[in-house]
């Protein structure tokens, strides 16, 4: 039985259309899922939408529709984004799904049975945009003297009856867990932030709301809906059949990686493990907080008008160019910046001109000069040197980097191996051998195919569709059957195209 591997993204609030930040997270998680599958792991991959809470209720009201109808419409756009970007999820979960209500109520009941819930009155600050409660000491003051959350969002004073979770009782248990499991929160910078926050002391957490009703009803508590983050985090269990247990749950829980943005690490690395401990469930192995995608160095915002639409990007550049760029350009974990020039330059230099051209030249020569029959690799010292460099990259450097989520580093190792292939082509000049030494030409082309196939496989988690086209073409030539006329796989993009 293959070793199970469960990876999740955060589930997005569908209170607007998805932007490139949502696409970035989905693509990174998909690269993880595809890479682990290729390593032979038995992967389950979940993504979806987070549909409850005040933010969604307010967005629906602004549109003049019921929250559920609004969520139905908007969730679909997120799912379409995932499908457009080739995101290989096993389940696209919606927190309005019926099984999610059951799971959320079950974890609540388990926490209640542990004696960790009590009824009281919440009086404090709440940010609707973050769907988060904040202590007075965390707030900052804005330009107009208004109070702001640490994320810079407006907060409002909230006072209502509420259920509380004894988060304070978990402070030491959490610190012990972080100490015993150094890889629990990654990267290191995020881990340090969480440690500082928890060491500073934890207040009990308000986990129900009574001033609106768009949420999962709290068990045995008329008038209370669950705090949206409690239900949202539970999605990771719902998708495996909690609370009924069963095959999926036994196989995939606890999760290997919750991939989330840096702004929601606290919820995943503090609240979530405390909820799980309270409910008597094992904790995920890793919470990884990736960086933010910025647009020319600036935060995206509707008011600035710089929100980048993933559908437009996929249409303009092609899905694989977009995927490649996002994972290539940014050191994973840090913030990254998107710009039109940057994506065009990367896609052209590395995908079209280097790998694409290598494949196209090689297959065209085989098609034209060898009747499409793929020859065997050569055994000359130059052939060995090239194939050893390629196998070092595809068997060691690239998987080692992808395993650590160091995508840009793995892609760098890949492109170096591609450059080595191109240098080999230039040095061997197979076109000149066509007349002078046709046998050697065959060997050189065979060596190139023997290099291109594993290179396509190694980069497939990043550019799945294009890599597969190359692999399929090569495999169509197995057992001596001729390959068809090759078509360029990576388009060359226009630098002069419309600005964005
Ligand atoms: N609904 C919560 C998550 C609940 S998980 C149990 C949420 N939703 S969100 O729509 O605001 O964000 C979804 C994910 O996208 C989060 O991981 C968030 O960090 C990430 N990103 C949102 N904007 C981003 C960028 N500009 N760049 C990269 N990721 C960003 O938070």
Image (cartoon, rainbow, N blue to C red):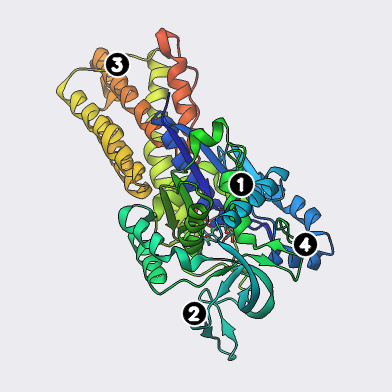
Q: Is residue 493 left or right of residue 57?
A: left
Contact flag, marks 3 and 2 (Cβ < 8 Å): no
Q: Residues within 10 Å of mark 1 (few under 14, many from 20)?
A: few
Question: Toward which corner of the image does residue 475 lie, by quadrant?
Answer: top left
Q: Earlier in the sequence, mark 3 or mark 4?
A: 4
Q: Earlier in the sequence, mark 1 or mark 4?
A: 4
Give 477 or 107, whichever is nearer the viewer: 107
Q: Nearer the viewer, mark 2 or mark 4?
A: 4
Numbered mark located on residue 222 in the image: 4
Residue under the point 27% across and 31% down: 390
Numbered mark located on residue 315 in the image: 1
Q: Earlier in the sequence, mark 1 or mark 2?
A: 2
Residue under the point 43% across and 46% down: 348
Q: Quadrant of the N terminus?
A: top left
Residue 207 image position (x, y, % from top left): 62, 65
Q: Nearer the viewer, mark 1 or mark 3?
A: 1
- For disc 2, the marked residue is 138
Q: Earlier in the sequence, mark 3 or mark 2?
A: 2
Q: Residues within 10 Å of mark 2 (few under 14, many from 20)?
A: few
Q: Is residue 51 left or right of residue 32?
A: right
Label 3 to label 4, Cα distance in Å?
78 Å
Q: Earlier in the sequence, mark 1 or mark 3?
A: 1
Q: Check mark 1 vs ligand 1: CB closer than 8 Å? yes or no.
A: no
């Amino acid at each position: 039985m293959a070793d199970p591997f469960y990876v999740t993204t955060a589930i997005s609030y569908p209170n607007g259309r998805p932007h490139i930040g949502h696409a970035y997270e989905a693509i990174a998680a998909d690269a993880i899922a595809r890479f682990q599958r290729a390593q032979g792991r038995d992967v389950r991959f979940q993504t979806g939408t987070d549909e409850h809470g005040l933010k969604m209720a307010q967005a629906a009201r602004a549109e003049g529709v019921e929250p559920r109808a609004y969520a139905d419409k908007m969730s679909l756009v997120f799912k379409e984004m995932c499908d457009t970007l080739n995101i290989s999820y096993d389940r696209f979960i919606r927190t309005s799904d019926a099984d999610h209500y059951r799971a959320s109520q079950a974890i609540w009941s388990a926490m209640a049975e542990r004696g960790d819930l009590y009824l009281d009155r919440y009086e404090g600050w709440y940010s609707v945009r973050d769907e988060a409660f904040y202590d007075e000491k965390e707030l900052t003051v804005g330009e107009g003297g208004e109070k702001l959350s640490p994320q810079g969002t407006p907060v409002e004073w909230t006072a209502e009856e509420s259920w509380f979770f004894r988060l304070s009782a978990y402070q030491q248990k959490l610190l012990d867990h972080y100490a015993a499991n150094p890889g629990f929160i990654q990267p290191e910078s995020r881990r340090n932030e969480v440690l500082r926050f928890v060491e500073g002391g934890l207040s009990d957490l308000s986990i129900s709301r009574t001033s609106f009703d768009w949420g999962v009803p709290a068990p045995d508590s008329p008038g209370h809906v669950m705090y949206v983050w409690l239900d949202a985090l539970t999605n990771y269990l719902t998708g495996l059949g909690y609370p009924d247990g069963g095959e999926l749950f036994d196989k995939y829980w606890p999760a290997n990686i919750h991939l989330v943005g840096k702004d929601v690490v606290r919820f995943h690395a503090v609240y979530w493990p405390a909820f799980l401990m309270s409910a008597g469930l094992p904790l995920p192995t890793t919470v990884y907080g990736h960086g933010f995608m910025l647009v020319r160095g600036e935060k995206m915002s509707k008011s600035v008008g710089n929100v980048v639409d993933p559908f437009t990007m996929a249409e303009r550049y092609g899905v694989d160019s977009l995927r490649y760029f996002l994972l290539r350009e940014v050191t994973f974990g840090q913030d990254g910046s998107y710009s039109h020039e940057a994506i065009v330059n990367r896609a052209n230099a590395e995908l079209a001109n280097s790998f694409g051209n290598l494949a196209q030249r090689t297959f065209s020569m085989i098609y034209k000069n060898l009747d499409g029959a793929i020859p065997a690799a050569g055994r000359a010292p130059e052939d060995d040197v090239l194939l050893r460099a390629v196998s070092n990259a595809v068997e060691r450097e690239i998987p080692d980097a992808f395993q650590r989520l160091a995508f840009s580093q793995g892609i760098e190792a890949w492109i170096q191996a591609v450059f080595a292939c191109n240098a080999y082509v230039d040095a061997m000049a197979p076109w000149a051998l066509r007349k002078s030494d046709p046998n050697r030409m065959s060997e050189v082309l065979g060596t190139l195919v023997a290099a291109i196939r594993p290179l396509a496989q190694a980069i497939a988690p990043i550019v799945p569709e294009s890599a597969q086209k190359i692999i399929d073409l090569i495999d169509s030539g197995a057992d001596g059957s001729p390959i068809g006329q090759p078509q360029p796989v990576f388009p060359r993009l226009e630098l002069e195209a419309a600005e964005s």
